[in-house]
Amino acid sequence: MAIIDVKVPQLSESVAEATLVSWHKKEGEAVSRDENLIDIETDKVVLELPAPDGGVIVKLIKGDGDTVVSGEVIAQIDTAATASAPAPAAAAAPAAAPAPVAAPAAAAAAPAGTASPAARKILEEKGIAAADVTGTARGGRVSKEDAVAAQPKAAAAVAPIALGDRSEQRVPMSRLRARIAERLLQSKNENAILTTFNEVNMGPIMALRKQYGEKFEKTHGVRLGFMGFFVKAACAALQKFPILNASVDGNDIVYHGFIDIGIAVGSPRGLVVPIIRNADQLSIAEIEKQIAEYGVKAKDGKITMEELSGGTFSISNGGIFGSMLSTPIINPPQSAILGIHATKDRAVVENGQVVIRPINYLAMSYDHRIIDGREAVLGLVTMKEALEDPSRLLLGV
């Protein structure tokens, strides 16, 4: 017998504890090295915990839903054992010859309510029971796509209550949603938040994308979007006004000698903000590639804690949902955040004439404790000027 422990991986310094979502193995079942044993949810990401070695699960010390910390032992594997097929009668009778563990039949139906971890989280947030969803994955398992498409049952299907068909459901917040709520309330209560606005004519960038978009995609393997320009424009402002890139630590102001920009990305589990590090040193193509990768990872729940840690400034794009204007909330300990919105044709005055231009409203919220209105307004103007004349971003002027 050679017993090894399965431990919770090292969580980041900002993550005190995590929750075990769902074991993929039971006691007595065989496991291969690096096979995913369980999904572990933190307030930032869902981690997959691979088996440290092959063998047989001899003990599950912690169960689904339990709270754990870094390094905690949650299971044990006997690396010298071999799982054997169940005997039809006398379990104690030795088999004629040891047989390899057979994989489950492809057609075997999963028990009602069996769902992948990602699907389970989506259903929990929708308040839908997995047993009420028809699974299309292997063996009838509920996939993430099934969960996204699932709709709550009609009110008539809910057990009648005193209020007739005015039903209610109580669903616990996911760890991520609870953490988002905590941080937003912290930001509101601890920062002196003020927001300044400006408008930007997106015509020059739209013309640039139309002229070079196809060639850009062929050359770099990624679409030329708007976010690369917004990130570079933000970098220009942060370099000109370093206080926008600073943070508060007690009674100190910390000036960062680097620009790490967080990009708010929606995911099935909620809002996450992965970081583009040293954004000022990257090309627009490199920025677009990172944003595209983060979008895929967020959708698949594969963003790591390291990719979510840090950041000196953030950008939130409500425009992808059609937002005209908003006041973004600072992501502490950062001191400023840029909100961008939907670009719409609007009537504007140029040289005394009313003309139609594709306009985007910019909103920058900032911590007035350390950032004065002058720096905030001029910083946003710097972004506006860079976006309206993209050649500035290439020439660094």
Image: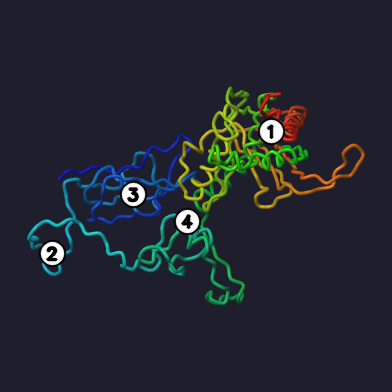
Q: What residue does disc 3 label?
A: 36
CA gap between label 3 and label 2 equals 29 Å
In this view, the mark in front (3 or 2): 3
The amino acid on which the numbered mark 3 sits, given as a three-letter code, is Asn
CA gap between label 1 and label 3 equals 43 Å
In this view, the mark in front (1 or 4): 4
The circle drawn on residue 267 is: none
* Quadrant for the C terminus in the image: top right
Which secondary structure lies at badge 4? helix
State the image quarter where residue 255 is shown.
top right
In this view, the mark in front (4 or 3): 3
Query: Which numbered disc, 1 or 2, marks the residue that appears first in the sequence?
Result: 2
- Identified at 65% across, 44% down, the residue is 317
Residue 363 drawn at (x, y percent):
72, 40
In this view, the mark in front (1 or 3): 3
Residue 245 drawn at (x, y percent):
64, 28
Judged left or right of residue 270, residue 204 is right
The circle drawn on residue 91 is: 2
Q: Are marks 1 and 4 in contact (CB under 8 Å)?
A: no
Q: What residue does disc 1 label?
A: 367
CA gap between label 1 and label 4 equals 34 Å
Judged left or right of residue 22, residue 374 is right
The circle drawn on residue 121 is: 4
Query: Which numbered disc, 3 or 2, marks the residue that appears first in the sequence?
Result: 3
Q: Are marks 4 and 3 in contact (CB under 8 Å)?
A: no
The amino acid on which the numbered mark 1 sits, given as a three-letter code, is Asp
The amino acid on which the numbered mark 4 sits, given as a three-letter code, is Lys
Which secondary structure lies at badge 1? strand
Residue 257 drawn at (x, y percent):
58, 22
Q: Residues within 10 Å of mark 3 (few under 14, many from 20)?
A: some
